[in-house]
Image (cartoon, helix red, strand yellow):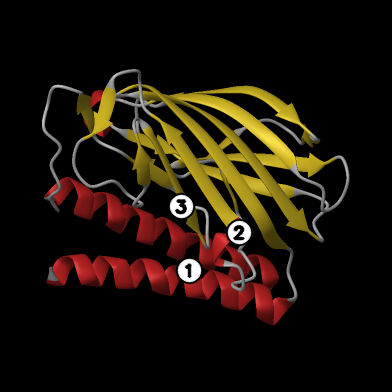
Amino acid sequence: MRERSQVLEAVLVGVFLLRAYAVADGAPVLRSADARIAVTSPHSCEVMLTVAVADAGEVEHRLAVFEGTTVDLVGLDGAGQVGAVTPVGRTQALVLRPDRTGAPYTVRYRVRAPDSRDHRCPLWIPTVPTDGQSRGAVQLQIDLPSGAVPNGGSLPSFAWRGGRGTTTLGHVPAFVRVPYAGSEEERGARWDVTRAMDATAAAVFIVATACWVWRRRR
């Protein structure tokens, strides 16, 4: 439990830093985000991410990936792509220019992860913090394969109705992790080493993004 508290505290600190930079520098802020995630296998998912960013001519998105991950950008609505998708460390950077400043736009893509990274779906998150005022600014919906049920704790936590989970957050997570099993198997809920590592990775990603934002504002 102590390790879990430390991990969650690190995540909260990272989120606070991102919000502080936005307020202090008058930088563009993320007004809303809506991610619709379809899990197609333990190692693959399809995502439709719709975001609205205030006061930004261009928005850079980052997708956390591991070796062996393949990403296919399926389509864009309401925004144009600026340059090619480029690797930056363990992320894929995608720069978009909204058709209208402040108007929502949508990114659609597919991800297949290596076998060692099962039940994870990374989000191509904008490197723009929320304003810290609206907890429900970010909405997530995830659909499991037909007949599947969640098996163990998810990251973040979802409210489930059958194989569909929903939640609202104050920030966009770097990824979601939802272990699942066939309907004949029992559901379980435990905090294990894998989940702790996932939460730590999320905390590191948030803090690294905060540092990147700070350096861009200098």
Q: Earlier in the sequence, mark 1 or mark 3?
A: 1
Foreground tag (1 vs 2): 2
In percent of the image, x 61 and y 73: which residue is there?
133
Task: Tell me the quarter of the image containing the N terminus.
Answer: bottom left
Q: Secondary structure at mark 3?
A: loop
Check disc 1 and give the amino acid type.
Val
Between the C-alphas of marks 1 and 3, the distance is 10 Å
Above or below: residue 147 compared with residue 212: above
Residue 208 shows up from this direction: yes
The one nearer the camera, 165 or 45, is 165
Above or below: residue 127 compared with residue 184: below
Residue 15, disc:
1
Q: Earlier in the sequence, mark 1 or mark 2?
A: 1
Residue 59, given in percent of the width and then of the height, sits at 72, 49
Q: Report the label total.
A: 3
Task: Tell me the quarter of the image containing the C terminus.
Answer: bottom right
Check disc 2 and give the amino acid type.
Ala
Residue at image mark 2? 137
Above or below: residue 1 compared with residue 127: below
Residue 173, disc:
3
Residue 118 shows up from this direction: no
Residue 27, given in percent of the width and then of the height, sits at 73, 69
Q: Is residue 6 left or right of residue 142?
A: left
Q: Secondary structure at mark 2?
A: helix
Q: Secondary structure at mark 1?
A: helix
Residue 178, given in percent of the width and then of the height, sits at 30, 38
Label 3: few (<14), some (14–19) or many (≥20) C-alpha neighbours in 10 Å:
many
Between the C-alphas of marks 2 and 3, the distance is 12 Å
Query: Toward which corner of the image does residue 21 lie, by quadrant?
Result: bottom right
Q: Is residue 29 left or right of residue 62?
A: right
Label 1: few (<14), some (14–19) or many (≥20) C-alpha neighbours in 10 Å:
many
Q: Is residue 126 left or right of residue 147?
A: right
